[in-house]
Amino acid sequence: MLRLATPGYLRFSQTNQLTATFGGGEANVAVSLASFGIPVDFITRLPENDIAHSCVMDLRKYGVGVDQIVYGGERIGIYFLETGAVNRGSKVVYDRIHSAISEIEPGMIDWDKVFEGANWFHWTGITPAISQGAADICLEAIQKANEKGITVSCDLNYRKNLWNYGKNADAVMPALIDGTDIILGNEEDAEKVLGIKAEDVDVTNGQIDALAYESVSKQIMSRFPRCKKVITTLRGSVNANHNSWSGVLWDGQILLEAPNYQITNIVDRVGGGDSFMGGLIYGLLTYNGNDQKALYFAVAASCLKHTIYGDYNQVTVEEVEKLMAGDASGRVDR
Amino acid sequence: MLRLATPGYLRFSQTNQLTATFGGGEANVAVSLASFGIPVDFITRLPENDIAHSCVMDLRKYGVGVDQIVYGGERIGIYFLETGAVNRGSKVVYDRIHSAISEIEPGMIDWDKVFEGANWFHWTGITPAISQGAADICLEAIQKANEKGITVSCDLNYRKNLWNYGKNADAVMPALIDGTDIILGNEEDAEKVLGIKAEDVDVTNGQIDALAYESVSKQIMSRFPRCKKVITTLRGSVNANHNSWSGVLWDGQILLEAPNYQITNIVDRVGGGDSFMGGLIYGLLTYNGNDQKALYFAVAASCLKHTIYGDYNQVTVEEVEKLMAGDASGRVDR
Amino acid sequence: MLRLATPGYLRFSQTNQLTATFGGGEANVAVSLASFGIPVDFITRLPENDIAHSCVMDLRKYGVGVDQIVYGGERIGIYFLETGAVNRGSKVVYDRIHSAISEIEPGMIDWDKVFEGANWFHWTGITPAISQGAADICLEAIQKANEKGITVSCDLNYRKNLWNYGKNADAVMPALIDGTDIILGNEEDAEKVLGIKAEDVDVTNGQIDALAYESVSKQIMSRFPRCKKVITTLRGSVNANHNSWSGVLWDGQILLEAPNYQITNIVDRVGGGDSFMGGLIYGLLTYNGNDQKALYFAVAASCLKHTIYGDYNQVTVEEVEKLMAGDASGRVDR
Amino acid sequence: MLRLATPGYLRFSQTNQLTATFGGGEANVAVSLASFGIPVDFITRLPENDIAHSCVMDLRKYGVGVDQIVYGGERIGIYFLETGAVNRGSKVVYDRIHSAISEIEPGMIDWDKVFEGANWFHWTGITPAISQGAADICLEAIQKANEKGITVSCDLNYRKNLWNYGKNADAVMPALIDGTDIILGNEEDAEKVLGIKAEDVDVTNGQIDALAYESVSKQIMSRFPRCKKVITTLRGSVNANHNSWSGVLWDGQILLEAPNYQITNIVDRVGGGDSFMGGLIYGLLTYNGNDQKALYFAVAASCLKHTIYGDYNQVTVEEVEKLMAGDASGRVDR
Amino acid sequence: MLRLATPGYLRFSQTNQLTATFGGGEANVAVSLASFGIPVDFITRLPENDIAHSCVMDLRKYGVGVDQIVYGGERIGIYFLETGAVNRGSKVVYDRIHSAISEIEPGMIDWDKVFEGANWFHWTGITPAISQGAADICLEAIQKANEKGITVSCDLNYRKNLWNYGKNADAVMPALIDGTDIILGNEEDAEKVLGIKAEDVDVTNGQIDALAYESVSKQIMSRFPRCKKVITTLRGSVNANHNSWSGVLWDGQILLEAPNYQITNIVDRVGGGDSFMGGLIYGLLTYNGNDQKALYFAVAASCLKHTIYGDYNQVTVEEVEKLMAGDASGRVDR
Amino acid sequence: MLRLATPGYLRFSQTNQLTATFGGGEANVAVSLASFGIPVDFITRLPENDIAHSCVMDLRKYGVGVDQIVYGGERIGIYFLETGAVNRGSKVVYDRIHSAISEIEPGMIDWDKVFEGANWFHWTGITPAISQGAADICLEAIQKANEKGITVSCDLNYRKNLWNYGKNADAVMPALIDGTDIILGNEEDAEKVLGIKAEDVDVTNGQIDALAYESVSKQIMSRFPRCKKVITTLRGSVNANHNSWSGVLWDGQILLEAPNYQITNIVDRVGGGDSFMGGLIYGLLTYNGNDQKALYFAVAASCLKHTIYGDYNQVTVEEVEKLMAGDASGRVDR
């Protein structure tokens, strides 16, 4: 997806200079993993034009495999971004209608070929939200992954403005979640997608009670027995420049917690959740079952994402581990 | 329409900075006229979002009336522009599918209100090319204008990549041209739209024989009896930086010619034809039937357009008349 | 007035790139009102050159009426702005001497025509500060407005560097304030302009006692019996990036207070007071005598102004009301 | 003088980014000389503010002595520049009224101190054009230079928009030229300033007859007997991007000519004449009476100026001599 | 190699904004081939730091294989570029001393692994010019390629400022050329490297006699019997903005010629020769022995390079073939 | 030294735009002093190329004397800077190997000429760290200064990545410090350079106990008897955007302390220590032995440096004294 952002804190009507980068939930996770040295392929459908070609070149730059992308359709999705400050929130204008991915149909992707040698498949709640075809192909992929014993993770990622093709999230998502092993969401997703509610959490005042998520996690796990871990990202929005950030992981037994970071001068918060997922997958793949360490890595990686411009998190394992180890001083490295 | 252009001569894959301006055939004519001091309204359909709102603010800045614009639909059309140099031509990637204007339907615009006090209506061949609804509403407008005795002008403006909704130009355009008084086209339009061919013209070598257009003009006029003037823009493409530029006007009796300008260091050639039309309407409205002067004004105005960045021609009557008077020296005015 | 600002936090000697926008007390109020949907005209005098013409085009873009502007004189006023950070304050270098507006004379503006259909006239203490002619025409306007029963508001806006034509504020302002219904000032204006002092207020330490302004308001109202409301903006300057912001309104009976916002990452504080005035006029015109709500609107609108680059406040009624309703979280709107 | 230019070929209304550099006739000559290694001081009057201070820092950067500048007054002169292309000329909007230099008075500069160790004084026709005081001080300087036996040169530099203080050039300039040894002008200056006409020269068509200037030079020399050399710059304006450029020097005996350069892709033509003067002074000082070589140097130096952005010519002696030697190929130096 | 270029035509002292891209003879050829769809790897030695890592990411973006690059050493070579205009040539300041590649030693690259599956090896005269180690490893590679029957091509690419380690080109290059099948050079290389002179060619006046190269080619071929084709690029430098461009190919029997392009508005001429080589290799690999077509492709590809910013040629086979087919009009593709 | 920084908070791989400024420990001190009106010369060795020439022009702009700089060698040192945010620290990539200054040899500078009329010599621990020659010449200068009775100051400035020529700091620095009168360091320098440890100081958590430095200062003074004052800068790194900042001065008798500033929105922290030194030298030279005032000036000056982009501190004495006087409010100065 092409992201067109105004520079600095300018409003749409104040500038004729837009900064073009690429992003989107799954692509963001892919770039995170590639930056951490994990071999990864991004699967999508793009039109055959120079804008989409630039997107592919950009992914290749970051080390993401692009050979499984299929081509066709008429346009690449776009979103316009105006970055807010203090009490004025950022604004996103979506222009993704009729994108190539939204007009995908089952059978267009050869999942056997895609999954050759793969051991993990990640999807997000954005894909089934954009069209019936996208929901169908997502289900197709999950079922094939299940057949092959590939771990499946998802980010619930509820976007109220996307579910426009006649079905609601609660009608579509459960079948997909049924085949999913690792589920990530923020404090609102479970309620919006599944009607499972986190009590006593006021997301606008920066004060969040992590423990309230234990009951939500348990409810999810009992409804979706394949699910082995439920992870919740915890964002406290003090204002547009200052968020607190943490996360919890429920493994069915205990609720693992992580430090709560104060991100006082946010550079770019878009893609924060995706960078959490990228860090989590890295941690789960790398730390040999040490879920606590994986969670810490995910929280630290996504904390750093808030200091990186664009959707993509571009930090190294060394940088994340330095923050995990407690050095949050931001001193000059020279 | 939103235009997103790479800076300088950079290719799409070379930059993440895009310059956002607005444009489109009819809007370009409107801005030309407003810059010349002619009261003018731009009629279109736009979605209700911040990008479209910025477009409206921009038109207002240039003095174009925006009160007749109707709102609805999902997106504003976009085109991406990469500016060529020497032997490498500019590239346009259209992304206008499902734009608000393409999904317009007859009845959405109150033409009686729009035409209150109006004495001229201009349309271009781009509008009927984008959808059946747009073609229908264009016909609706022309018929209403004819009823009210409003002069109707058109720019044939053939774009081969636009006629995608199942009909060809030759099936749709004649009914619209039937109600048109002033017809403008370039050396290819008549052939592509109406099958009327200009003989012995090689558009790529910079050498153009203006006289060959007399026969084309006569054929048009005999097929469309309402038509009173046929104007042809004459562009010789030496290379992407250097074009020659002129035009001829056939009034049914004689072929009026104009100077042939050598534009050796083009700043922006997009909107060249539209600025010709803007200049021509100004001249026809202002010079009391002196068609020769109107043609000179149109050619000089659009010659200057090639020195102005963006789709819009932003020159004054004084500047055009200075060039008409023979001062092409480009000396500093201080 | 043309504003020429260095980018980011660069000093004047560090850059050769200046960002040119337009602004000035009364223009800022006009743009605020236009953004809120209130029909408004800006009255000034500008020279006939391309810089002034760009200023007019810019105002038109924001929806401000420009048909009452008169032309003449030799230059448009300029101010150079260098934005400070932390303990280094912003610097303004004024270059407005001999501006067209400073050389205005009574009789140059046809106030009968200007006030046709008007119900509100706003002036600021900057205008009478720049020249005798400007002071005279300001008085002329106020008297005409009084005759016609038009509400008159003013922002005292004391600028010590402007009163250079031989008279002090206290010699000129009282006659103007005599005809004014609504008076706005900050914590210093009343003292500097009228010698009315707010006790126990230290404007540099971020701690402000709102109650101290009640006595000031009472003194103003008793000296200027026409005055119906006195409004004081309350700025606490923690540092150049962090201000607190609020305001109080005295209606002759009670002192209405508003929330005190912590603006921790200021984007641009110039025009803060003007955006307060714009919000206040909107509120007084719209909320049917609910002064409390008008004050809240004014404070919230001007709080948001601190997040908008340039002199002009470019926010919508919806955005202000969202903040008034308590959502200061700055969350992404998507 | 502060120069504020739009980027690229943008019109004033198209951009809010201005490029700020410094310039002005005499400053430009000073920077040329400093770049060629000649010790030089620039004498002017500037206000005490940060903009003027930046101007001084900039001159210092280029190696120009700034210790003789006097301070006072209210503003630094400004000019706005919009760069033209092809048939659209550049536009200059002057905003120099009431500049510090225009309000200078005789006695403000200590010419004895300024001229200590000096052997050359250069003035231009711009200075006496801006005010009576500036004309007076110019005369004061010339007389003092004459007393001390310092060579005096001038560039007639007629600007029709400047002579606004009640006197015309022909009433003021002769007294100043009386004390001048070396006189430079373009094809129009002699006529506009002194009524001495160059016959048969059409400055707009790019064809110039160098010989016609012999008679003009003779007339000047007979009217001003102190004058030892008359130099004429020859610009042919093909269009805004393409000028021809040369010059001739009359030493009272013969007319020395120089090559005629075709400058096909002008980067910046402002300051062209000043860079000619800078080159000429360098040549006359350095080449031991070889006026032919001095003329060649002046023409080549100013030819190169057209490839340098800004008012200042920033080329080295080596670069000029390379072009003088015939290498106009523009090959990469690596 | 990192290239740091001033924007537009600014001199080094005029700007503090540098545009950073990557380039260098062999990398440029690699990007050309990748853009044409030919699988290609770039072999070099880079230090382990973020600047070098950005270089690798950039190559990956363009589709060049980077897995064979070896790491070590202290710095990446840099060159500073100031782009000239008209009679002022571009300036290159090399800062490549002690680059990682210059400190390479034989044995650091595993040529057996590198050449696995390869059928072509290209080297340039720049590599042996920078150090003895680089010359040694170049010879090592050529000998290994010869053993394996891999075609070897070279671009003589003489740079007078590089041969600083104590040996001259004529002492080092012959041994390398001995193992080379395809030799490319410009009109000066053969003389500077091998003392073989092209008579009657004046490279600065834009007039070049292609036939003079036949004798040079024959001399090369008789001295280096392995050589099968000698190709000469023909550049005529009218000025810094306008070059003519062509090339000839001698296959031992006949001299194949190509069209001579007038490149009147050069965007970037650095890398012109490299883009010729890239086009030639593509043509020789693709057109099944049709050397005439390969030459045409090489000339057209490198003609287009002059319109592309940066060292890398970023054009497609379709674009080159369109120009080969005679369409040099630069018309808009929409 | 050339500094090449990415804009905003972009990572090296995210941008191709670098901002080029100049800096380096001693140059930074020189610019500080020149800005405060103290005559100062910067002594270094630079290559003869355009990049070094731009560096010299830049120093001249800021008023630093450059006539004592010697020329030779092959390159100017470079450092690449990526500015961090929140928990991500800034990154510096040094590329200063084989710089002209690192290849300096004793005898290359005529210290008698340099020290003519001088009363202060300042050196930093960076110079002896880069090469044996640089260490030798530094010692040469100190000894000559001692002979002449010139006050010598140093900033210990330990950089672990620089000491690469085979000697450690503790082997080289003591001989240099022996001749030094005023010693400045931060909380780590004394330990790293001299093995003198400050107890109980945790530099990463923003809490610093100033008193702990008294013992360090005493140890330094007893080991280096010439030393008259030991000054320690106190930086608390809350995060990359927020540091606390202060300093203490030990004069052998008492520990003078200064206010502790909270710098909550850092613009640029590079050069912070150098600006402290510049302020301190100014204070010691100007305040007639009032060390307390000198310390306050140093702390306030360097506090302001954190709001100035680039290595150089560009503030005036008036601005520093305003902050010293307690006005940290950052209010607009207009």
Image (cartoon, coloured by chain):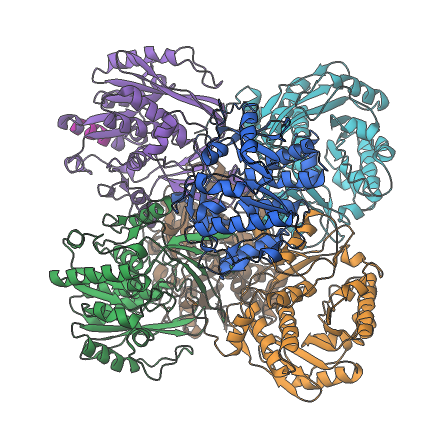
Chain colours: A brown, B purple, C green, D blue, E cyan, F orange
Q: Nearer the viewer, residue B239 or A224?
A: B239
Q: Nearer the viewer, residue E268 or E295?
A: E268
Where in the figure is residue D308, as x and y percent of width and height? 58, 40
Q: Nearer the viewer, residue A106 or B297?
A: B297
Where in the figure is residue D82, as x and y percent of width and height? 44, 41
Whether residue A105 can be seen here: no
Q: Assess whether residue B139 is covered by the magenta stretch.
A: yes
Left-right relation of A20 to C44: right
**Identity of the residue drawn at 32% across and 31% down:** B130
Where in the figure is residue C197, as x and y percent of width and height? 31, 80
The residue at the far bottom in this view is F253
Quadrant housing residue E292:
top right
- Magenta segment, which residues? B137-144
Whether residue B130 can be seen here: yes
- From this view, report whether residue B26 is shown above or below residue F32: above
Q: Nearer the viewer, residue E97 or E255?
A: E97
Query: Quick one: quadrant of the C terminus of chain C?
Result: bottom left
Left-right relation of C224 to B86: left
Label total for image: 0
Quadrant housing residue B308:
top left
- From this view, report whether residue E120 is shown above or below residue E255: below
Quadrant housing residue A223:
bottom left
Q: Assess whether residue C103 is covered by the magenta stretch.
A: no
Where in the figure is residue C242, as x and y percent of width and height? 43, 70
Magenta segment's dominant SS is helix
Query: Quick one: quadrant of the N terminus of chain C?
Result: bottom left
Left-right relation of E226 to E332: right
